[in-house]
Image (cartoon, grey):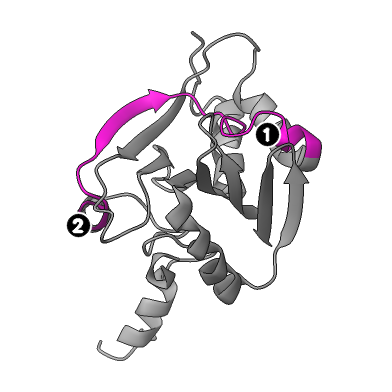
Amino acid sequence: MMGCGKQETASEQRVESAPAGFTFLDLGANTPVGDDLRDRLKRRLGSVAIVRRTTIDLDANFPGLLQAHFSDLAELNRRLNWPPRERVEHAVTQLTYRYIDPDELPFDKVVLLFADATGLPVLLNAYSDDVGASLRASLEEKYGVPTEISWNSGRTWVWTQGQDRLLFTAWRDQYDRPRHTITIYYSKNLQALMALEEKGGLKPSGADKSIF
């Protein structure tokens, strides 16, 4: 019979499906990868290179940073890459965008990793040149005052929401050119991936304000 159950309004449905946590181009921690998301990303970021089943290195951008300042992420990275000195691949899909229109977005490369079992994002890296400096102001306006870390030749600003972290890092490359990197660690989703793998459900193999 009509009216026997609680009917969700369109507004309630939008709230439930809204991107949660740290967002990037309307992608949140609860946003599954699918045709709709890929179409949206293609419109904003251009063509994509897809790799299925690959490694996950949370410390790849700035080796040693996690061990020095984020012990929980360093431990998670150790588990993701155990045993050491072996190529440990995970059931994830990597989307890499390198042909981004600089008039549209201030990035020259964006890399996203999604867990195959859940479809949810586990890691995001977005790279920018000196234009990216203005992004920090947008992040502060949306997420508040960050914690600041100085290290070697770089500086990192950190925001935390629950288990997840967003890092904005300013550094210089080997040619002394200013570079900026945005990294989102979807730690809750990473933990879920690890839990599935460690239980045997998945087996790793050895060998601009509108942006956020």
Do we see residue 15 in this rendering?
A: yes
From the viewer's side, name the closer residue of 140 and 196. 140
Indicate the quadrant where residue 82 lies. Answer: top right
Residue designated by label 2: 43
Residues shaded magenta: 41-68
Picture residue at 52% right of the left edge, 48% below the top:
180
User: Which is more foreground, mark 2 or mark 1?
Assistant: 2
Q: As displayed, is residue 23 above or below residue 73?
A: below
Residue placed most toward the observer, 65 or 58: 65
How far across and how far down the image is residue 126, in percent?
44, 47
Q: In the image shown, does 10 or 142 lie closer to the viewer? A: 142
- Residue 77 is situated, as x and y percent measured from the top left of the image, at 65, 30
Q: Residue at x 43, y 71 (%)?
A: 209
**In the rendered structure, which disc, 2 or 1, sits on the residue that comes first in sequence?**
2
Asked whether 163 falls inside the magenta stretch, the response is no
Q: Mark 2 near mark 1, Cβ–Cβ under 8 Å?
A: no
Name which residue lies at 36% across and 78% down. 13
The CA span between labels 2 and 1 is: 33 Å
What's the residue type where badge 1 is placed?
Leu
Quarter of the picture containing the C terminus is bottom left
Q: Is the residue 22 above or below the residue 141 in the image?
A: above
State the mark number for residue 76: 1
The residue depicted at 68 percent of the width and 48 percent of the height is: 155
